[in-house]
């Protein structure tokens, strides 16, 4: 499911929730009209869910693929034997640009170098039954980082205590040349135009709601149930 389609759907929901109310009335000379204000109920908007730090904003969800075209449905409760597809996307807060990484062609194995790549790695840790961290791949089709976790009847059940760790690439300093006067003579000097930015990471915890580090509280957490 493309992010663009998701954003359009959200926009449509917002627009459909806006109603335009109008009132008209008429009265003859010997008629008394009383206008009663309509009763309205105001509901406070839900807080916007944001996870990240000074350097990057990270969003993570899980989906299940339900057709040959690769369309996805949001889902957080799975059964042993199903494939849990993790998706991650986000923003480089220093530039406002989306998270992008070089990709690998699934057919040829060749590296696809992406313009504006700003992520060096996106990994998932602590998946039950997995021997170590797994790497998420950048999908050039829809802009998600994804990983398909294939479960089996031997995969431990319960809340999945995973972590997604995203690491930004370091940014080199840029320089410019200026003219300066030294001992009465003009010369050129190279100075820093924009300073270098070191590599920074953010860890999204599935159980992070309790410690203020990402994630949603139950029942929104990813759960794996036993097969029937």
Image (cartoon, rainbow, N blue to C red):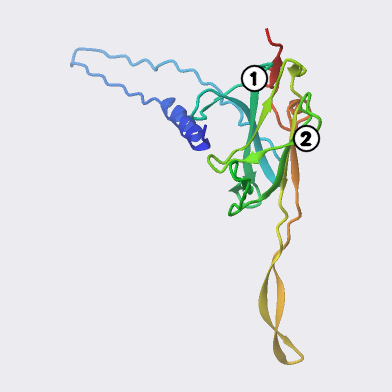
Inspect this view and state whether residue 100 appears: no
Q: Quadrant of the C terminus?
A: top right
Inspect this view and state whether residue 108 appears: yes
Of the pair 90 and 193, the residue shown nearer to us? 90
Where is residue 31 shown, x and y percent of the image?
A: 22, 12
Where is residue 40 shown, x and y percent of the image?
A: 46, 18
| Mark 2 residue element | loop
| Mark 1 residue element | loop
Q: Residue at x 70, y 28 (%)?
A: 215
Disc on the earlier residue, 2 or 1: 1
Where is residue 115 shown, x and y percent of the image?
A: 58, 54
Find residue 82 and name its label: 1
Q: Residue at x 39, y 25 (%)?
A: 19
Tag 2 residue? 133
Is residue 4 toward the left or the right of residue 19 in the image? right
- Give the farthest residue toward the right: 131
Quadrant of residue 17 within the rendered picture: top left
């Amino acid at each position: 499911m493309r992010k663009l389609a998701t954003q359009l759907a959200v926009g449509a929901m917002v627009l459909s929730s806006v109603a335009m109310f109008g009132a008209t009335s008429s009265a003859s000379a010997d008629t008394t009209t009383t206008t009663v204000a309509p009763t309205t109920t105001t509901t406070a908007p839900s807080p916007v869910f944001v996870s990240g730090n000074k350097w990057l904003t990270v969003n993570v969800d899980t989906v299940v693929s339900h057709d040959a075209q690769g369309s996805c449905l949001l889902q957080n409760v799975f059964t042993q034997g199903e494939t849990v597809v993790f998706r991650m996307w986000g923003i480089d807060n220093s530039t406002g640009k989306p998270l992008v990484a070089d990709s690998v062609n699934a057919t040829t194995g060749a590296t696809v170098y992406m313009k504006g790549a700003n992520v060096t790695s996106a990994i998932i840790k602590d998946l039950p039954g997995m021997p170590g961290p797994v790497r998420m791949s950048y999908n050039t089709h829809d802009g998600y980082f994804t990983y398909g976790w294939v479960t089996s009847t031997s995969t431990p059940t319960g809340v999945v205590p995973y972590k997604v760790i995203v690491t930004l690439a370091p940014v080199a300093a840029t320089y410019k040349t200026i003219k300066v006067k030294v001992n009465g003579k003009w010369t050129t000097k190279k100075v820093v135009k924009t300073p270098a930015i070191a590599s920074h990471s953010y860890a999204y915890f599935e159980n992070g709601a309790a410690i203020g580090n990402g994630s949603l509280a139950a029942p929104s957490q990813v759960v794996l149930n036993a097969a029937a």
